[in-house]
Image (tube, grey):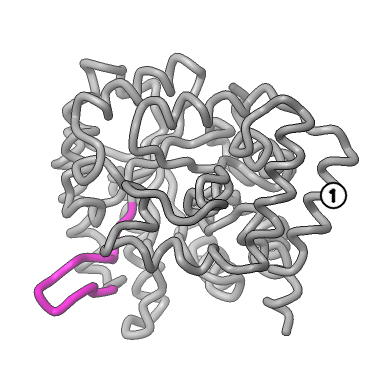
Amino acid sequence: MENRRLGRTGLHVSALGLGTMTWGRETDAQDAAEQLRDFTDAGGTLVDTAGSYADGASEEILGSLLGSAVHRDDLVLCTKGGLRQTARGTVVDSSRRALLTDLDASLARLGTDHVDLFLVQAPDLGTPLDETVDALSHAVTSGRALYVGLSNHGAWHTGYVAGRLSQADGVTLAAVEVEHSLLARALEDDVVPAAQALGVGVIGWSALGRGVLTGKYRGGVPAGSRGASAQLAGFVEPYLGEAASSVVDAVCTAAAGLGREPLEVALAWLLERDYLGSAVVGARTPGQLRAALGAVDLVLPPAVSLALDDVSADDRESARA
């Protein structure tokens, strides 16, 4: 698998990243271990987790596999802080106290003294951004994180944090992680140009459009899928409308013509983006991950790439409106 430089840092990450949001919730430790072995055997390095995933169980499972299923130094560990579940619901807190506390808790669960990349998981309107910058700077200067970045933040936040970090301690904003797929292209008009100008790497999460680009929802919502789950149906529902259906149909048509699977075509299109450091895919089962790994050797014919660009352009247009 290709390894790509993350922005203008010296950090390299695998073109496909392994998402672990299902670990400890829908994926047990045995299947997680199989996923991790298959991923690293294919040349994958970037493993993406967060303290908020399954209330920390994702990190606990990953930590239990370091040194047994895979060597710690063979991975680029990325985790996130600033988001937690409470009895009152989801709390976003990007204060210095919260971020450094979350990072220390993640390190304990992972069983390591540092992560390679630490991200602020979501914008926090209740905390001064300079305080968040200070926490990120301290995460690096204290050795807890080698690189830092943002997740789910816009272009303005990216530019401000990158500038303030550099002014404060010369720390580099390494990455911004945002949703990106054929069904989520709005970032191409703001976040991507900002990241390129600043030398910040781009990591795309939900590279398969929340599972919709696999084509499994074309005939309705299958039993056992996220769309059929009372907890997760709202996560999938935005991509089950008419606009998304036309994109999925185009992906399936292209896949049939190429003799490949729809998810391989969708991932191959995303991996063509020259600004992309890594595309994160989350799989509930080892079989689903192996199917995604099949995309790394697929090069789309230019005509297919252009057709997919055209049919998926509505997302960018709606963002401009």
Say if the magenta span includes residue 55.
Answer: no
When the figure is inspected, residue 44 is found, relative to residue 46, above or below; the finding is above
Q: Which residues are magenta?
A: 80-92
Instruction: Residue 279: give x, y in percent of width and height.
Output: 56, 42
Specify the quadrant that holds the N terminus: top right
Residue at image coords 23%, 73%: 90
Nearer to us in this view, 284 or 261: 261
Residue 76 is at least partly visible in this image:
yes
Give the side of residue 160 with respect to residue 58, left or right: right
In the rendered image, which residue does mark 1 sit on?
307
The C terminus appears in which quarter of the rendering?
bottom right
Give how far across and how far down residue 266 sits, in percent: 65, 42
Q: From the viewer's perspective, is 272 left or right of 222? A: right
Where disc 1 sits, the SS reads helix
In the rendering, at what x and y percent does residue 89 appear?
19, 75
Is the residue 158 above or below the residue 143 in the image?
below
Residue 173 can be seen in this image = no
Measured along the vertical axis of the image, is residue 136 above or below residue 73?
below
From this view, report whether residue 232 is shown above or below residue 27: below
Residue positioned 68% across, 37% down in the render = 265
Q: Amino acid at mark 1?
A: Ala
